């Protein structure tokens, strides 16, 4: 079972840095994420979702390949590739994997302009090593919502919302 964790930051840059750190830890097999999305709200109040994967581009590439292959069977590979790419891009555009976009947008309406949040759908985690790797974010974020157990959520809040040690 996956767990949802939503962490907000007063600056967009911190959210992008957190996502980069989590992606690096995923490469090291310390965390397995199903989805990680950054949601920003600009000064005008416009909400933008920064998906980790562009499903439209993936759909176009996959559709183009299959269209080319099928087009070769019917002696018209260029038409097949074009139709396949178009169909793949369209299906990718309307596909929603992972965290529900409407849920993220609804939650982001409560954000202050200029803020950002990272929505993380975690499948597996090695908590002690991941928290050690996120030390630079200590005291900079705020946990908005989770599906963790009460004790796990309190531990995460204590870590992220604690004030960092002064040098």
Image (spheres, rainbow, N blue to C red):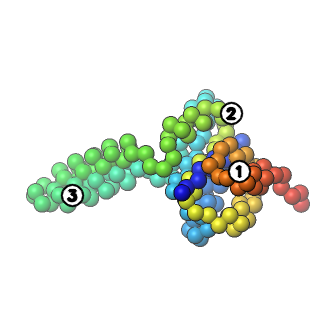
Q: Is residue 50 above or below residue 108?
A: below
The residue at the far right in this view is 167
Residue 40, located in which quarter of the rendered image?
A: top right
Q: Residue at x 75, y 60 (%)?
A: 135
Is the residue under label 3 in contact with that under label 2 (CB below 8 Å)?
Answer: no
Q: Residue at x 68, y 43 (%)?
A: 144
Mark seen at residue 150:
1
Q: Residue at x 79, y 53 (%)?
A: 158
Image coordinates of residue 149 in percent, x first then y, are 67, 53
Residue highlighted by disc 3 = 68
Looking at the rendering, in which quadrant would you find the C terminus? bottom right
- Judged from the image, the secondary structure of the residue bearing numbered disc 1 is helix
The residue at the far left in this view is 75
Horizontal side, residue 6 vs residue 2: left or right: right
Residue 13 in view (yes/no): no
Disc 3 or 1, which lies upstream in sequence? 3
Q: Residue at x 31, y 56 (%)?
A: 62
Residue highlighted by disc 2 = 112
Give whichever of 153, 65 is nearer the camera: 153
Image coordinates of residue 2 in percent, x first then y, are 55, 55
Q: Residues within 10 Å of mark 2 (few under 14, many from 20)?
A: some
Looking at the rendering, in which quadrant would you find the N terminus? bottom right
Give whichever of 146, 116 is nearer the camera: 146
């Amino acid at each position: 079972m996956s767990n949802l964790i939503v962490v907000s930051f007063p600056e967009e840059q911190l959210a992008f840095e957190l996502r980069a750190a989590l992606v690096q830890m995923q490469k090291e097999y310390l965390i397995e994420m199903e989805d990680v999305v950054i949601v920003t709200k600009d000064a005008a109040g416009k909400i933008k979702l920064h998906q980790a994967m562009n499903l439209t581009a993936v759909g176009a590439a996959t559709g183009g390949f299959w269209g080319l292959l099928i087009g070769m069977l019917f002696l018209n590979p260029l038409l097949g590739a074009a139709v396949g790419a178009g169909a793949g891009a369209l299906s990718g555009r309307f596909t929603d994997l992972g965290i529900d976009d409407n849920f993220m947008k609804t939650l982001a309406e409560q954000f202050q302009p200029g803020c950002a949040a990272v929505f993380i759908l975690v499948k597996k985690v090695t908590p002690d090593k991941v928290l050690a790797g996120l030390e630079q974010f200590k005291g900079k974020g705020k946990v908005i919502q989770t599906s963790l157990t009460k004790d796990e959520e309190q531990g995460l809040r204590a870590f992220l919302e604690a004030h960092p040690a002064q040098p």
